[in-house]
Image (spheres, rainbow, N blue to C red):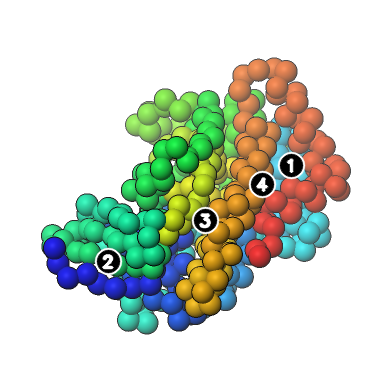
Amino acid sequence: MPQAVRTQVGIIGAGPAGLLLAQLLGVRGIESVVLEDRSRDYVQARIRAGILEQGTVDLLTEAGVGQRLHREGLRHDGIYLQHPGHREHLDFRGLCGRSVWAYGQTEVVKDLIDARLATGHQVEFEVGDTALHDLDTDRPRITYTDGAGSPQVLECDVVAGCDGFHGPSREMLPADLQQTWARDYPFAWLGILADVAPSTDELIYAWHPDGFAMHSMRSPSVSRLYLQVDPHESIEGWSDDRIWSELSHRLAFEGWQLQSGPITDRSITAMRSVVRAPMRHGRLFLAGDAAHIVPPTGAKGLNLAVADVAVLCEALTALLLQGRSDLADAYSDTALGRVWRATHFSWWMTSMLHPTGDPFEAQLQLSQLRYVTSSPCAAQSLAENYTGMPLG
């Protein structure tokens, strides 16, 4: 075996959770090594979430990686909720005093990688054969093959599993300790990126009897739009003309017109909710998609990963710098409290906005939409959850 490299925190996964954890720990003087099985180009090009909660923006700013976000991100102070013949605006600033930002996950990842490299810390990309060992001791190890094909050993005080739903970390929880709650939804999202200026100043969530539609954005010149489709649909069956025609149909509103443009990316994403517990075993701590998945309707996936990291950073700081284990021992329960709140909100938004073909359920959905847009208390609850409860 090769000679082991020593660090304090071994982080598996160079997505937003792993990279932000490394950045926050570095600010506090805690060393880490980040391992990623994909290439840097792939990681920086993954099309994922695009809406950042107030707390996420504040934490990125605190970590020293918010400059470009504040310069190029689009602050949104509300959303539109629509059903045929009606489009109502919810004013987040007036309802709860918070905002959200349109700023793609790809940009967050680029900012975090640039910041890490600027401080002389490397991210090891294209590693393979990653395996975790001795997690129930105070000296866990990670073995892997580096990008050049050489076997490596990383000795740590702690391992942070930020490697998503398909990574090796979550499989290391003993089977007799694992609990999993899951729900698969009977629909999917067809999402596109298009080189066309957004046709709206803020996001539009539209209920339509033919299926949900959403108008989001990535920048003043790039639009992000979604259609509810059958989960068994093939992307090859959706031409540009068909996509734009269906979007125009479902988003139609008197006096407003959807602008179309060249589609640069398209994909179909299944909708599911998954929560796994516990989020900690021995010296292994899970964060982000390694522990939970939410449907994208509530814009919670990336933000929930950031919230995990905020709690985990405090726990690891106390453990590694102060010799206190109380926050680490409480990490799973603390993080899961927020996970379940976000999971419920994401389920609620999804259930309210996606018709299933059941006429009775459709009337319930329309009643809920009318209530949310007419009751200040209901609107405030949506605004509080959408913009994110304060971190910490």
User: 87 or 328, which lies in front?
Assistant: 328
**x, y (%) of residue 277?**
52, 44
What is the quadrant of residue 334 in the picture?
A: bottom right
Q: Are marks 3 and 4 in contact (CB under 8 Å)?
A: no
* Residue at left offset 65%, top offset 17%: 358
Residue 49 shown left or right of residue 125 in the figure: right
Amino acid type, mark 2: Leu
The quadrant in which the C terminus is found is bottom right
Which numbered disc flags the more N-terminal residue, 3 or 2?
2
How far is the residue under mark 4 from the one under mark 2? 36 Å
* Residue at left offset 59%, top offset 58%: 330
Q: Which mark is residue 303?
A: none
Residue depth check, mark 3 versus mark 1: number of the one nearer the observer: 3
Which numbered disc flags the more N-terminal residue, 3 or 4?
3
Residue depth check, mark 1 versus mark 2: number of the one nearer the observer: 2
Query: Up-down: is 183 above or below 162?
Result: above
Residue 42 shown left or right of residue 306 in the figure: left
Q: Which residue is mark 3?
A: 305
**Tag 3: Cα neighbours inside 10 Å, few (<14), some, or many (≥20)?**
many
Residue depth check, mark 4 versus mark 2: number of the one nearer the observer: 2
Q: Which residue is mark 1?
A: 87
**x, y (%) of residue 196?**
49, 53
**x, y (%) of residue 366?**
75, 30
* Residue at left offset 64%, top offset 50%: 337
How far is the residue under mark 3 from the one under mark 1? 31 Å
Q: Are marks 3 and 2 in contact (CB under 8 Å)?
A: no
Q: Which mark is residue 154?
A: 2
Q: Taking the image as drawn, is residue 76 in sight?
A: no
Q: Which residue is mark 4?
A: 341
Amino acid type, mark 1: Arg
Which numbered disc flags the more N-terminal residue, 4 or 2?
2
Q: Are marks 4 and 2 in contact (CB under 8 Å)?
A: no
